[in-house]
Image: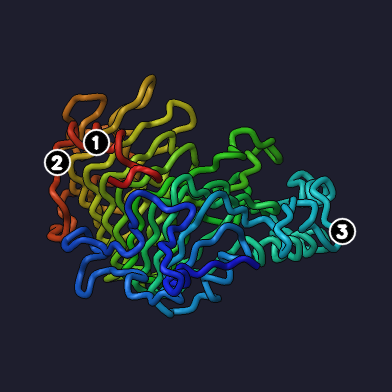
């Protein structure tokens, strides 16, 4: 294992030690600026800025990354990712394919034959092939699920890529993730759910980044995508696309005080879920999230979908896909989305009313929205379009944001986000 501490080991020799992959500016001890969204509330978010020299690492492979994370340790730490790290590797660094994870006789064709709705019906899969799928999935999860503990900063050095990983910020506080290209959290063993949506669907296991039960988290200048294995190129089984990816960034299970800024979400179906269940009433008063200066490009839905939370969505750029588009802003149970000065661009058949969808939600505040360069009012258009089929939305969300950076016009934000969002673009 080649875990490398960034320490003053060369000091005794009078040498200046410069890491091989150093950027022009070391961002690893940056902290969230004051008033920059919900994550700045109270004590703010500093990540691993207090780390001593023994807990600052440059990592170049999965083994080094796992060691640096320390099993979710809360010791202040800074982890710098260099080059490309593939989570689907063994302890020797050799790539693992889906076939390497398969065990107990799992075989996709046998799985499809066993649970074909025409013969199996609508019951939940059970029996030898489902048990084998679960065992195989557990083997992959052991490799790709990486737990991030409290008081941690993870930054990508120039060109850093994290492939196939499910970064889980689990029951943690004070975490920063920046300047990282995280791609292709690929599930080798999706499960068939016969009754999902009435038609059945394939359910996958991994998000690129998952915040669960965590607070004071800042995600900034990351790029999240399925790059490498787009779901649109997967086959169709049982009349449904054989999905391999879940969310890009999901914020669930009572997570709170989160700022997501200057990041890029691209070429994906379900991008961001805030609040995972209508029945999770313990989420009331939590799930406070700020999304600003992010780009959602060719995202089909959930940009974001919100339950319970007070979510400030401002100065974001949406490049809406023309095929299979569902919606961008999802208004769900007891949510309070406060949207300001966002810009939407699309071609073809997409209309303004398509930008919003409601499931049991009643409120959406919106102002300053641009649609293909023209100012629009989302609520009256949505309410008129959906009259008689869904309840009207009201602008009374019950709160007003106070923690935010300068809010620019949607036109100005559209330009700035196109130039500045995503990994490798920190000024």
Q: As drawn, which residue projects farthest toward the top? A: 348
Q: Quadrant of residue 257?
A: bottom left
Q: Secondary structure at mark 1?
A: helix
**Sequence-earlier tag: 1 or 3:** 3
Mark 3, residue position: 105
Residue 362 picture location, percent across and down: 26, 53
**Residue under pointer 2:** 408
In the shown orientation, is residue 158 left or right of residue 333? right
Residue 312 in view in this figure: yes
**Quick check: 388 above or below 136?**
above
Residue 384 image point, x, y percent = 23, 34
Check if mark 1's residue and mark 2's residue have beta carbons within 8 Å: yes
Q: How is the image coloured?
A: rainbow
Q: Is residue 388 something one can see in this rendering?
A: no
Residue 267, relative to residue 37: is it above or below? above
Q: The C terminus appears in which quarter of the rendering?
A: top left
Q: Viewed as shown, does residue 193 lie left or right of 256? A: right
Circle 3/circle 2 CB separation < 8 Å:
no
Image coordinates for residue 273, horizontal then vertical, percent: 41, 54
Q: Residue at x 45, y 39 (%)?
A: 266
| Other-residue count near label 1 (Cα within 10 Å), few / some / many at <14 / 14–19 / ≥20 | some
The kind of secondary structure element at disc 2 is loop
| Structural distance between the alpha carbons of marks 1 and 2 | 10 Å
The x, y position of residue 392, in whole percent, is 24, 45
**Figure quadrant of residue 27:** bottom left
Residue wearing tag 1: 416
Mark 3 packing: few (<14 Cα in 10 Å), some, or many (20+)? some
Quadrant, the N terminus: bottom right
Q: What residue is shown at x 54% (from left), y 67% (from top)?
A: 4
Give the number of the disc on residue 139: none
Q: Looking at the image, is mark 1 or mark 2 earlier in the sequence?
A: 2
């Amino acid at each position: 294992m080649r875990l490398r501490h960034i320490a003053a080991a060369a000091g005794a020799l009078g040498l200046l030690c410069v890491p091989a992959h150093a950027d022009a500016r070391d961002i690893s001890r940056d902290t969230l600026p004051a008033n920059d969204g919900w994550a700045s509330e109270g004590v703010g978010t500093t990540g691993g800025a207090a780390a001593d020299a023994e807990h600052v690492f440059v990592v170049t492979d999965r083994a080094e990354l796992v060691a640096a994370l320390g099993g979710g340790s809360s010791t202040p730490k800074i982890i710098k990712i260099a080059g490309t790290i593939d989570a689907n590797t063994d302890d020797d660094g050799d790539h693992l394919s889906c076939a390497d994870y398969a065990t107990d006789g799992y075989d996709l064709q046998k799985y499809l034959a066993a649970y074909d709705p025409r013969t199996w019906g609508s019951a939940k899969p059970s029996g030898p092939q489902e048990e084998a799928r679960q065992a195989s999935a557990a083997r992959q999860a052991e490799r790709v699920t990486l737990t991030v503990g409290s008081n941690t900063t993870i930054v990508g050095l120039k060109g850093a890529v994290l492939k196939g990983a499910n970064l889980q910020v689990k029951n943690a506080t004070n975490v920063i993730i920046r300047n990282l290209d995280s791609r292709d959290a690929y599930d080798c063993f999706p499960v068939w759910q016969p009754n999902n949506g009435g038609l059945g669907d394939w359910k996958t296991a991994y998000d690129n980044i998952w915040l669960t039960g965590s607070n004071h988290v800042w995600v900034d200048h990351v790029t999240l995508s399925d790059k490498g294995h787009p779901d649109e190129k997967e086959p169709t089984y049982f009349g449904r696309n054989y999905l391999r990816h879940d969310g890009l960034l999901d914020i669930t299970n009572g997570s709170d005080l989160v700022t997501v800024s200057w990041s890029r979400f691209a070429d994906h179906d379900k991008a961001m879920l805030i609040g995972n269940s209508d029945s999770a009433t313990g989420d009331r008063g939590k799930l406070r999230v700020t999304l600003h200066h992010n780009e959602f490009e060719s995202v089909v839905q959930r940009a974001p979908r919100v339950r319970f939370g007070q979510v400030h969505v401002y100065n974001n750029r949406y490049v809406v896909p023309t095929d299979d588009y569902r919606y961008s802003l999802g208004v769900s149970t007891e949510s309070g989305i406060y949207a300001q000065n966002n810009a939407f661009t699309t071609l073809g058949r997409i209309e303004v009313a398509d930008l919003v969808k409601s499931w049991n939600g009643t409120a959406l505040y919106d102002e300053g929205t641009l649609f293909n360069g023209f100012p629009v009012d989302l609520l009256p258009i949505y309410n008129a379009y959906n009259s008689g089929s869904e309840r009207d939305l009201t602008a009374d969300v019950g709160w007003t944001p106070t923690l935010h950076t300068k809010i620019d016009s949607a036109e100005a934000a559209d330009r700035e986000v196109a130039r500045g969002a995503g990994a490798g673009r920190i000024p």
